[in-house]
Amino acid sequence: MGAPATAYDEKKETCGTVCLKYLLFTFNFLFWLAGGVVMAVGIWTLVEKSDYISLLSSATYAASAYILILAGAIVMVTGVLGCCATFKEQRRLLRVVSVDPQLCTAVCMHTHSLTRAHTHG
């Protein structure tokens, strides 16, 4: 009979697990950066191009800028939560982070279809 298993033995990580952890952290960090870029483009559109919004007959341009800002903020929050969940190895938070982009995609697709129906209908 061997010695009883310690917490260290159960927590021992293989090279693949460590590489996967760092890969997931890197992906979430890049996801956070991309969200910042999308949000920055939305803010830039509102600040710099606000003079042109009044010339357009449709409110789609202004709405798209706000959608970019909202989507960028959601992606940034998701990226930060993903980095924290990966670093702290919290499985529940990782599940939430994995569902969030799917939900955002569904909402964006629905918003896009409503916008197209409104402008072309």
Image: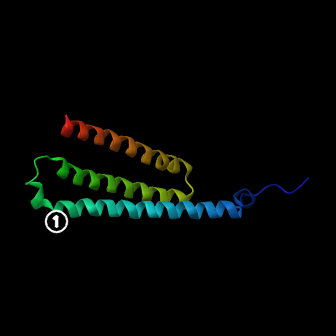
Q: Position of residue 77 (x, y in %)?
A: 38, 56
Q: Say which residue appears at 70% left-offset and 64% top-offset.
A: 15
Q: Quadrant of residue 8?
A: bottom right
Q: Is residue 14 left or right of residue 94?
A: right
Most extreme residue toward the front is 120
Q: Say which residue appears at 34% left-offset and 63% top-offset.
A: 36
Q: Nearer the viewer, residue 33 or 1?
A: 33
Q: Secondary structure at mark 1?
A: helix
Does residue 78 sit above or below 105 in this rendering? below
Q: Position of residue 95 (x, y in %)?
A: 52, 46
Most extreme residue toward the right is 1
Does residue 19 sit above or below 118 in this rendering? below
Q: Position of residue 98 (x, y in %)?
A: 49, 48
Q: Position of residue 73 (x, y in %)?
A: 32, 56
**Other residues around mark 1 within 10 Å, as few (<14) / some (14–19) / many (≥20):** few
Q: Badge 1 is on which residue? A: 48
